[in-house]
Amino acid sequence: QELNYETGQKYIIEEITVAGETSFSEQTIITYSELRKGQEIKIPGKEISKAIKKLWNSNLFNNIEIYVKEIKGSAAFLEIRLSDLPELNQVEITGIKKSKKEKVIEENNLDKGVKVTENLITTTKNYLVNKYQKEGYLNSKVTVSTREVKDSIQKSRVDMSVFIDKGKKVKVKSIQFNGNAILKDSELRAAMKNTKKKKLYRLFKRSKYIEADYKTDLKSVIDKYKENGYRDARIVSDSLEILDSKNIALHINVEEGELYTFGNIDFIGNTVYSDDALRRLLRIKKGDTYNGVLLEKRISDETKPDALDITNLYQNNGYLFSTINPVEVSAEGNVIDLEIRIVEGKPVYFNDITVVGNEVTNDRVIYRELHTRPGQLYSKANVVRTIRELSQLGFFDAEQIGTNFLNPNPNEGSIDLEYAVVETGSSQIELQGGYGGGGFIGTLGLSFNNFSLRNILNLDAYKPVPRGDGQKLSLRLQASQFFQTYSFSFTEPWLGGKKPVQFSTSLSHTKQFLYDYQSREADRDKRFNITGVTVGLAKRLTVPDDFFTLSQALTFQHYNLKNYNTGLFTFGDGYSNNLAYTVGLTRNNTANDPIYPVRGSNFSVSAKLTIPYSLFNDVDYAALKDERNELLDVIADANNTDAQRTEASNRVGEIDQERFKWLEFYKIKFKADWYTELAKKLVLRPSLEFGFLGAYNNDRGVIPFERFFLGGDGLGSYSLDGREAIALRGYPNQSIQPVDKYGNVSNDGGTIYNKFSLELRYPITLNQSAKIFALGFLEGGTSYNSFKDYNPFNIKRSAGVGLRIFMPAFGLLGIDFGHGFDPVPGGLTKNGWETHFIIGQQF
Amino acid sequence: CSPYQKAMKSEEISEKFQVGEEMFNKGKYAKANKLFKQIVPNYRGKPQAEKLMFLYSMTFYEMKEYYLAGYQFDRFVTAYPNSEKIEEAAFLSAKSSYTLSPVYSKAQVETKEALSKLQEFINVYPNSQYMPEANAMVKELDFKLERKAYEIAKQYNKIAGYTGDYEASIKAFDNFIFDFPGSSLREDALFYKLDSAYKLAMNSIASKKETRLENAKAYYNSFKKAYAASEHIKEADKMIIDINNELETFNTKS
């Protein structure tokens, strides 16, 4: 039947039938086609083609055709012929490891039951080819074929086989330049950041050929010329030569052009800033060698959001809609005259500031951290700072904090800003059991970083714990047969909600039992209890700048001994109290990631003081000191009888009880770290530390508590006496003990220490789910017992390498291998290799 | 072997449907859901699918899986525009979003979604039996958004002693009053706006003090005019005395 499209005639549909292999009911298909019995249509006409399109778009059918079976007068009999698209039955992937197959299936949606369209086959193939070329398999080949399944199930199904031939990894054997006279081949090769020649020692950046990277590298080559005044340099041609299945060679022909210099530079359109002010930012003079890259950077440096350039001058002072365009007005005699044309626009003020995506954290916790507020002049620097500080809260994924500028209104000079955040897990649970110290040790630690104390009685808020108020709560229980430790701490960063005054409190209680060497069990009658309370306030300061924090804390510790004789105390029954006030000042402007800072520094200085009781308690400590020294002589003299010596030793205990009833000391500490990005993400971190513990009354003496123990991983080991473990890798834990002028080594820690360290860090991955970086270090430290012996440069040196892994659920874990070049005090040969395991952020 | 266990293992899809429906009627929604889940792909495009999909959506709703319920009801509404259950499905979809709407101080994605779904429902079914409930939900959700904006503006006032930025609070309250003209929090908003302006003027540098005092005075007048019986009026009256005293020093100077 011959039908003419232009002169389509009107018909009434009398009947529609469906033919072909399909598992769908006739009624469904007809309904879906939107053709109805009794409908008036044109044949040929748009209704039929619309119906075919509709069925196509369902992605369920193949070979769709609509026929006119018969025409009787004005009645038309239609037939829809189609077949079901085959469903995917099984996928077989060959040529890659089993573990990788699942990912391929997942990312291409090759699940059982999906409809196999041509599109699915093509996208799968392209995806795989791209993926392997990106990994350097230039010659990868992928074939995708389908095979019909013949079985009793009526549905049409196919098996798919994906054959992947990755081929060999292709490396670039040589990169040759032609036509270059001014710049050497090696200089141009260095400019190519991602396409590298194959070399044995190239470890971090392996040689591979990726077309997209290569294209950007060609641009870098031209940029290299532009930086040197060759404004007209271009790549005339480039070719890729296949040497064999594993190697290629690149040939690049360049034309260098001539050398240009800067001529007159005029600013046009600037009313807010003077020519001089802008010229100071530009820092380019007439007669300088032309450098297009530098010019662009001084106008707008895309690589650094906080760069000192002309665009940022305007952007940080409200001129959001300003544009700055350098225009070459003359290039006569290879001298380029420039006009920098500036359109300033109106200064822009923020109208509405909103935060979205905070599914857990309450508004008040976020809004108080914002440095952009309604009514403020727009400033890019403040936006950048807000993003940085939001990421430092640790509640949001630092990589995913975004900003959206909404409703820009250049006429009124207003804009809305929306911060988009993505919540991230910030709670840690630690549950461990281990065998150590002669018995089983169990630990249960809970740490909630975004806790909500207000909701602690609200059962609905337990998902699984009340969260969202930015408070920190941690609980820790540790027990073995020899000791039990309970601790609890709570921190509220904005006490009262008006100012960032951090309130923290902690309680802890420790019970320690003496080891009975005969029964090899804990002797519960001999015990040592320590109970402690700390209350602290820390305040962010606004002067000298707002990176400073002033912290104050009051701590009280009560030591109680029952029948417990250790080296620490000369008395077995008794007590000691430690009431101290600590004041500290820190300045932290490290950025961006708290786990892996790349710039900034971190300083802290603190003083811990007790009341100088000896000034007013009328105890003659000088006499006690003399008496004690005499008694010590008695004990040391082997000619005395046992009874005499026991009596003397008891009296020493009494004197010490008097000395330690209320501990009296002051302690000064200083610590500084610097972070510098040497190359992309390669960070150098020098640091130094110093600490000093002193006595107000030299006759009363420096207490045996609160001392510095240098060496090893620096982990806060189980400490009875407020000791501070200071890390020094390459030596055993707490092994660097002070040596007095006679060469005697003590084992009760130092009162002075200092430490220098130099660390080089390089990230392996900075994913949100796992951050891993490698490091190399050089460090040295020493500790002394008095200023008389003190020599800060007589240090124990070490060097080594290590690895850190941070995962939000586990915190920071790490391992370091350190080599100690000096003997430990009391030793004769160098200490050699030590392995340190790190938990938490110590270094 | 219970009929449920048997149906779970059965190859027969009609048996699964039948047992699933029985389970649904008995209120055993989790079991019904498991059975329906198995047969949803088999019924795609078939006439019985309409009933199945509605029951399947209902099981999620009854199991308090509101995310999935909302999604399934939405799909039902688009897939079966002629269904007699469509009004109920549209309403339950909106109600699912309403149930998911969190406290005002967190992200309000679900609140906004529920509001737009409810608004659409109200437009399409103005005579629905669910109307009173829908209106009540709209009111509650609207107030949530109001409260959010209000509390943010109030926090700017609270932290201004630290940030020094009272203007932020004034601007945010202005935005609030503009965005929610009929709000029940308007009285408080006007008062805290006055409070911000008052504190800004009092802590101002000399060169800007007079204009800021005048501004605060204007805010006081409009507050007094609108809410003469406000619980804040005593505090406001104290402020105006201070403001007038300060203004006098400017008058005597000139």
Image: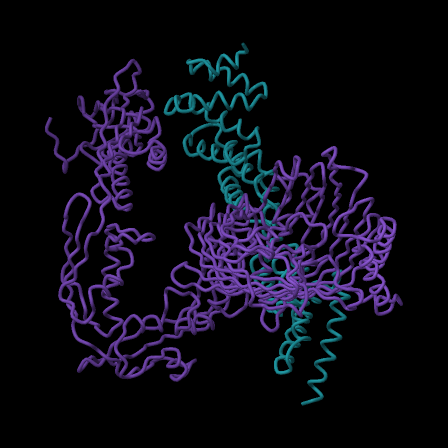
Left or right of A207 in this view: B78: right
Q: Nearer the viewer, residue B177 or A68?
A: B177
Residue that sits furthest to the right in the current view: A618
Q: Nearer the viewer, residue A517 or B224?
A: A517
Q: Quadrant of residue A181?
A: bottom left
Q: Quadrant of residue A286?
A: bottom left
Q: Point out the image quarter for the N terminus of chain A.
A: top left
Q: Nearer the viewer, residue A213 or B29?
A: A213
Q: Nearer the viewer, residue B83 or A834?
A: A834
Query: Where's residue A534, x and y in %?
Result: 73, 55
Left or right of A551 in this view: A12: left
Chain B drawing hue: cyan
Asked whether residue A40 appears in the rendered view, the answer is yes
Residue that sits furthest to the top in the current view: B1
Query: Where's residue B198, x and y in %?
Result: 68, 71
Q: Point out the image quarter for the C terminus of chain A.
A: bottom right
Residue at image location 14% in from the left, 36% down from the top: A7
Asked whether residue A373 appears in the rendered view, the answer is no
When the figure is inspected, residue B37 is found, relative to residue A301, above or below; the finding is above
Residue that sits furthest to the front in the current view: A639
Chain A drawing hue: purple
Residue at image location 75% in from the left, 41% down from the top: A514
Query: Where's residue A642, x and y in %?
Result: 85, 48
When the figure is inspected, residue A102 is found, relative to residue B171, above or below; the finding is above
Left or right of A732 in this view: A758: left
Left or right of A383 in this view: A716: right
